[in-house]
């Protein structure tokens, strides 16, 4: 293969490097989001054992993407990093390809929730990136570092420290940039509506019959003309032949009392002020049940503003929260994980409007 010109390789290095830096930083802004996306893939493959390690995978991958991006730009250890990036992009292409051809994954999480891509868009991006990395890999021996060893190592160590600190910060204080539908300023009721000019899924009914021991499937248009009692009906299913975009940003938000009463609309349509404290479970109870919480509860009580603790853990909620001046509401764990990346997170609400949201670690901002 004819070697690429130096300027062409520099341009490719910058493109690949910036893409990996951007990808790593966007996901480092919300490492829990990436871990949930990993769990989605593992569950699709029935690899449930790995679910307990997805957060660690996410933290390491985000640091590596930023590190590798900087290393490629400065041309440091290209023999090593082109190998690593080639293996990584092959793995990414496999994941996005699986999402495209299986239809089981709606988004791949390549750029987190801030820049959602369809599986097809992600797959095309990975194929192009594979081609660029392959060029660098084939020309790796001709690329020399533009930085001295001490400078390069210092720069890469700073990348590791910065990305690690960013991830530690957002896991305690919420993402720096909130790209979720539950972000401050959004109206939950509006987010529960389908997008304007949304297209519904195109669905075809599939009928399954057995005749003479042979099972066949038919659509409504292809049912046999001699359909009679000799055909044994088995079942009917709906198959999506073309997926639309009518799914609203918030599709499954619902709040229930301990008795099972749906109070979602009563709260969101109220127009009044109230505070929701989302605590998926009570593993961090000793962290957020502190003087700040007690002061907030007291302040809200004096102002006649209701405080609701929203959880998916009914059993522990009844045990632990019995003497706390707050109402208990139940919500799906997945919804809580999406709404509140930190366990626990305060939402200051007025009707369906999210006035503000903050982590328990920043509860003093409310006081």
Image: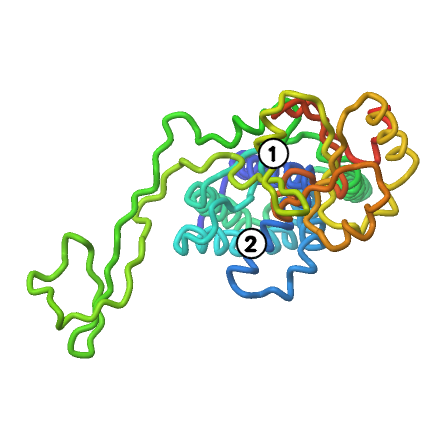
Position of residue 259 measured from the top left corner of the image (x, y, whole percent): 65, 47
Residue at x 65%, y 54% (from the top left corner): 80
Is 74 placed left or right of 284 in the picture?
A: left
The reply to whether residue 346 is in sight is yes
How many numbered marks, from 0 up?
Answer: 2
Residue at x 71%, y 52% (from the top left corner): 313
Ranked by sequence position, the earlier of labels 1 and 2 is 2
Check the picture and name the quadrant holding the C terminus. top right
Q: Tell me: residue 248, above or below residue 315.
A: above
Is 178 placed left or right of 103 in the picture?
A: right
Residue at x 55%, y 36% (from the top left corner): 15
Among the 4 quarters of the image, the one containing residue 355: top right
Q: Nearer the viewer, residue 242 or 160?
A: 242
Tell which residue pokes out farthest to the bottom in this image: 213
Position of residue 156 measured from the top left corner of the image (x, y, whole percent): 76, 42
Q: Nearer the viewer, residue 154 or 263?
A: 263
Secondary structure category for the residue under label 1:
loop
Q: Tell me: residue 78, above or below residue 250.
A: below
Q: Tell me: residue 217, above or below residue 352.
A: below
Position of residue 78 measured from the top left corner of the image (x, y, whole percent): 64, 49
The reply to whether residue 72 is in sight is no
Among the 4 quarters of the image, the one containing residue 158: top right
Is 40 placed left or right of 125 in the picture?
A: right
Position of residue 52 measured from the top left corner of the image (x, y, whole percent): 69, 60
Q: Which residue is mark 1?
A: 180
Q: Tell me: residue 354, above or below residue 279.
A: above
Label 1, label 2: how far apart the Cα atoms are = 18 Å
Secondary structure category for the residue under label 2:
helix
Residue at x 61%, y 26% (from the top left corner): 352
Q: Which residue is mark 2?
A: 40
Colour mapping used in the image: rainbow
């Amino acid at each position: 293969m004819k070697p690429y010109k130096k300027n062409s390789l520099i341009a490719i290095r910058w493109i690949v490097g910036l893409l990996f830096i951007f990808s790593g930083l966007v996901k480092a802004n919300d490492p829990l989001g990436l871990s949930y996306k990993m769990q989605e893939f593992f569950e699709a493959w029935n690899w449930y054992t790995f679910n307990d390690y997805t957060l660690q995978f996410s933290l390491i991958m985000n640091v590596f993407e930023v590190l590798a991006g900087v290393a490629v730009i400065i041309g440091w250890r290209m023999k090593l990093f082109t190998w690593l990036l080639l293996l990584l992009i092959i793995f990414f292409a496999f994941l996005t390809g699986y999402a495209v051809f299986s239809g089981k994954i709606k988004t791949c999480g390549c750029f987190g929730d801030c820049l959602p891509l369809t599986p097809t868009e992600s797959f095309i991006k990975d194929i192009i990136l594979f081609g660029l990395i392959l060029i660098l890999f084939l020309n790796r021996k001709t690329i020399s570092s533009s930085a001295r060893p001490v400078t390069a190592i210092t720069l890469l160590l700073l990348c590791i420290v910065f990305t690690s600190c960013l991830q530690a910060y957002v896991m305690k204080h919420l993402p720096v940039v909130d790209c979720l539908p539950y972000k401050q300023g959004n109206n939950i009721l509006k987010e529960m509506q389908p997008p304007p000019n949304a297209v519904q899924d195109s669905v075809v009914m599939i009928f399954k019959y057995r005749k003479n021991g042979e099972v066949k499937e038919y659509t409504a248009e292809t049912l046999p003309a001699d359909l009679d009692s000799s055909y044994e009906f088995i079942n009917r299913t709906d198959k999506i032949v073309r997926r639309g975009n009518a799914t609203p940003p918030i599709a499954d938000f619902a709040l229930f009392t301990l008795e099972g009463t749906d109070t979602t609309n009563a709260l969101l349509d109220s127009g009044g002020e109230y505070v929701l404290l989302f605590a998926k479970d009570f593993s961090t109870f000793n962290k957020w049940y502190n003087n700040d919480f007690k002061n907030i509860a007291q302040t809200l009580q004096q102002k006649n503003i209701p405080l609701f603790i929203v959880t998916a853990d009914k059993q522990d909620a009844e045990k632990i929260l019995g003497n706390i001046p707050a109402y208990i509401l139940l919500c799906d764990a997945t919804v809580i994980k999406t709404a509140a990346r930190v366990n626990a997170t305060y939402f200051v609400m007025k009707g369906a409007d999210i006035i503000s949201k903050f982590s328990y670690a920043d509860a003093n901002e409310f006081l």
